[in-house]
Image (cartoon, rainbow, N blue to C red):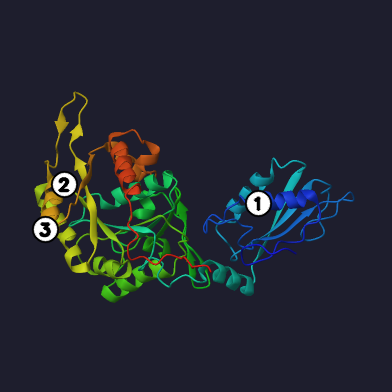
Amino acid sequence: MTDTPGPAEVPELTTDLERAAWTRLGSVLDPEIRRPVTELGMVASITEGTEDGSGGASGDSVGTGPGHLTVGVRLTIVGCPMRDTITGDVEAALADLAGCTGVTVEMSVMTAEQRAGLKEFLTGGRPPNPFGPGTLTRVYAVASGKGGVGKSTVTANLATALADRGLSVGLVDADIHGFSIPGLLGTTARPTRVDEMILPPVAHGVKVISIGMFLDSDRPVAWRGPMLHRALEQFVTDVYWGDLDVLLVDLPPGTGDIAISAAQLLTTSELLIVTTPQQAAAQVAARAGELSEQTGQQVAGVVENMAAMTLPDGSLLDLFGSGGGQTVSDRLTETLGREVPLLGSVPLDPQLRQDGDGGTPVVLEHPRSPAGAELRRVAESLAVRPRGLSGLKLPVTPRD
């Protein structure tokens, strides 16, 4: 038995094909944790059949001669929702392996000790709040002054566009009373619990958590301040996010409890303000940005949604007026004493609404549409923004 990085050892491998299969399975990622199954102690055994047809993890497989592999996989919990996905991924990884004539996947469940080892491997040495001081994850808290400006739609599309660029992205739906992120991402998956640790579902390459994933039906959430804070705290500290490049937080409209709690829990977060061109909306949005003076946050920029739409004859339809985004940008620049750029103006686009209703973000489904192209451009600007390392504690140890 040879040690491997992770909570388990390499299973007994006696043939060249078994060893080759182990190497190949290193490319199979757990759908929720997004780490190789070989690293997580999920591969219990790999057995090649023999001339007499014996072999297999259970020792009683029939008709599995040389070249047939039986792979024993440990699931984290009974009834794991990703069971079929893991089976398919293992089979696909070994399908074209030289010398492999067939694959059988046999499932079992981790023991309590194995789950404890997995949790320790994933969280050991990590701070209770992975997005506190010193984090290298860029955190954007997406805010708006009022509801109905398309804040959640913008957030969902920015998250998936960033993930499509190859970044590791997480998304917290912190709009507890008005959660909509699961629908916009087209996911009905529920989080998996490994003891006290929560594994978030992945949708379009984005790890996502929402209170809607814990409800049995689409019913209202009647919570007040302390419960709201605790819910956000659990989303931040109890969910296993792994190493993220970017975390987006979809805040509820306004400057209430959640916005303040987010600033306290996510101490390095930057505000991203969403408004419409309408001047009334812009005034309220500017107040949301000015909250940063009290919370100590930076404002990354402003996104104007529902901007002028180009009609087939080439004329512009500014249904909600014009200039609101620039108004917010200018006001915050003056009030805060530093530049707050207008990152983009997303035009009114029926495709954006249709794709949102269908759970397929427009940046993926119709990336060249007017709204899709502009949202991808905004995501690109966020992806390449430099992050200063001043004041951060880096994991560097001097050597003699």
Percent coordinates x, y for residue 55 in the rendering? 82, 55
Q: Are marks 2 and 3 in contact (CB under 8 Å)?
A: no
**Would you say the residues marked 1 and 3 are in contact, meaning their CB atoms lie under 8 Å apart?**
no
Distance between the Cα atoms at labels 2 and 1?
A: 49 Å
Q: Nearer the viewer, residue 95 or 20?
A: 20
Quadrant position of the N terminus in the picture? bottom right
Up the image or down, 314 lies above or below 103; here it is above
The image shows residue 230, relative to residue 273, as above or below, that is below
Q: x, y percentage for residue 31?
A: 54, 54
Q: Quadrant of residue 39?
A: bottom right
Disc number for residue 325: 2
Does residue 317 show up?
Answer: yes
Give whichever of discs 1 and 3 has the lower sequence position. 1
Task: Classify mark 2: helix, strand or loop.
Answer: helix
Instruction: Read off the residue under disc 3.
Output: 335
The secondary element bearing badge 3 is classed as: helix
229 up-or-down from 319: above or below? below
